[in-house]
Image (cartoon, rainbow, N blue to C red):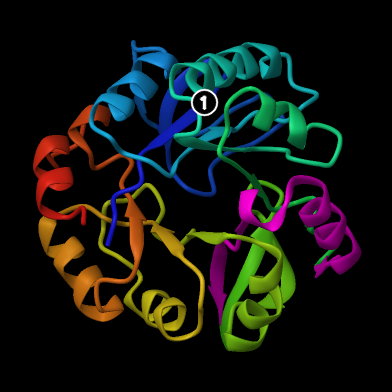
Amino acid sequence: MNFRPCIDIHNGKVKQIVGGSLRDDGNTAEENFVSDMDAADFARMYRERGLKGGHVILLNAAGSEYYEAGLKQAEAALAAYPGGLQAGGGITPDNALSFLDAGASHVIVTSYVFSDGEIHMNRLEKLSRLVGRERLVLDLSCRKKEDGYFVVTNRWQKFTNQKVDAALMSSLASYCDEFLVHAVGVEGTGSGIDSELVRILSEHTAIPVTYAGGIGSCEDLECLRRISGGRMNYTVGSALDLFGGPLEFDKIITKYNN
């Protein structure tokens, strides 16, 4: 079980927001925390601690007035920790290589592959060939409906018809190096992990998975370790003291990082 740090960038600032509150219209989001530190400051901190596999996420859409400011922040973070961070947010074949050239170890993709309610395997195959399977992370962030968990896109607002289960994860594993999964229903709340989703993810994948969502205490991390058998990587956002929360960064990486 490894801790994966995060740097979420919105309107040119490093932030933690409430999951599902992001809106492109007006560039708004319900904020849990806005940092005075730049993305590169966090990247250097993570590099000094030897923490790899974290993610830098651009939360503004490419057409936003804030996108360029966010992009500069992301590029500075990648330059500060080359090979140590993954990059996501609007990744397509047109820009994927530029993020890798800027220092990202992987690119993270969601909406390019999952759009109009379904998965586009031709797009996944194209991107996987372009960057290499070993440098691609597939985001399977999902919400629960009556009969299971389904991948969501468009700022986590739109359900696709893709259920997160053994069949989906098996079919996708050969195209990517890792899955990143936000439990959107509890993301940014610190209210506890989605145990049911963690159980599904733990049982049905042969490649690494990083779980995000709801972690607010050491008890939550113990629960995550127990359910996943210690095989699940994780990230903590708003609950971390770096972002104004109660969980101590140094304690977490000492106790819950293999």
**Residue 163 shows in this picture:** yes
Task: Identify which residue, 175 or 5, lies in the foreground.
Answer: 175
- Quarter containing the C terminus: bottom left
**What residue is shown at x 53% (from left), y 43% (from top)?**
21
Quarter-of-image position of residue 63: top right
**What residue is shown at x 73% (from left), y 40% (from top)?**
91
Residue 177 pos. (x, y %) = 58, 60
Residue at the disc numbered 1: 9
Q: What segment carries the magenta color?
A: 118-145
Q: Is residue 135 magenta?
A: yes
- Side of 232 where 86 appears, left or right: right
Residue 44 pos. (x, y %) = 34, 19
| Mark 1 surroundings within 10 Å by alpha-carbon count, few (fewer than 14), some (14 through 19), many (20 or more) | many
**What residue is shown at x 62% (from left), y 73% (from top)?**
150
Q: Amino acid at mark 1?
A: Ile
Residue 92 pos. (x, y %) = 80, 41
Q: Is residue 255 magenta?
A: no
Residue 147 higher or lower than 209, as above or below: below
Residue 159 higher or lower than 10, as above or below: below
Give the SS element for disc 1. strand
